[in-house]
Amino acid sequence: MPKIIVHAPATAFDATTRQAIAAELTDFALDCEKLPKSPFVKSTVWTYFNACNDDAVFMGAASATMPVVSIQIFVIEGGLDADAKKRLIPGVTEIIGRHLGIAERVPVYIVIQEIAEANWGIFGSNPDLAALRATPLDAPSI
């Protein structure tokens, strides 16, 4: 049940594209975390888009010359093994690059932050990664 925060210039993605990206990131992140794609588990993956004014995005001290994107992915500690992290970074980069229309040297910066279950709360309690992995495929969304 990752939480994904996408920081991008305001003109990088329109509303339809943001929804498509959120859907793709959800499915891909659940694959990486080995979580079922039940309506319930999908509804626990929240993606936020923070749109920055184009004049507020810089590459060093100069205004950005391309749509640079930063992504923070918060996961429960133990949810991603080393191989999953190695898949997650290029996979997320490919998704964003495809929607930006960029195939090579996609300007995406990704940070994966692992949070202990005790330090993660949802709906007033701590999540249980093992229980999420055992969620029936027909479990209804939140």
Image: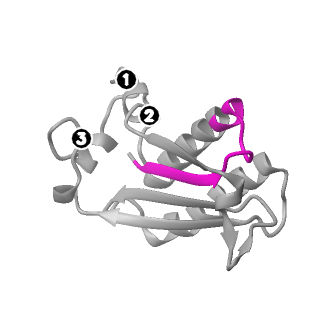
In the rendered view of the protein, which quadrant contains the C terminus? top left
Which residue in the protein does label 2 denote? 42
Three-letter amino acid code of the residue under disc 1: Ser
Which residue in the protein does label 3 denote? 122
First in sequence: mark 1 vs mark 3: 3
In the rendered view of the protein, which quadrant contains the N terminus? top left
Residue 24 as seen in the image, left or right of residue 34: right
First in sequence: mark 2 vs mark 3: 2
Residue at image position (49%, 60%) is 72
Residue at image position (74%, 68%) is 63
Three-letter amino acid code of the residue under disc 3: Ile
Q: What x and y, as percent, mark residue 105? A: 80, 70
Q: Was residue 4 drawn as part of the magenta stretch in this picture?
A: yes
| Numbered circle sitting on residue 13 | none
- Compared with 58, 46 (above or below) is above
- Whole-number angstrom distance, CA of label 2 to CA of label 1: 7 Å
Q: Nearer the viewer, residue 128 or 15?
A: 15
Which residue in the protein does label 1 denote? 141
Q: Residues within 10 Å of mark 3 (few under 14, many from 20)?
A: few
Q: What x and y, as percent, mark residue 19? A: 62, 33
Three-letter amino acid code of the residue under disc 2: Lys
Q: Nearer the viewer, mark 1 or mark 3?
A: 3
Q: Residues within 10 Å of mark 1 (few under 14, many from 20)?
A: few
Q: Name the element at disc 1.
A: loop
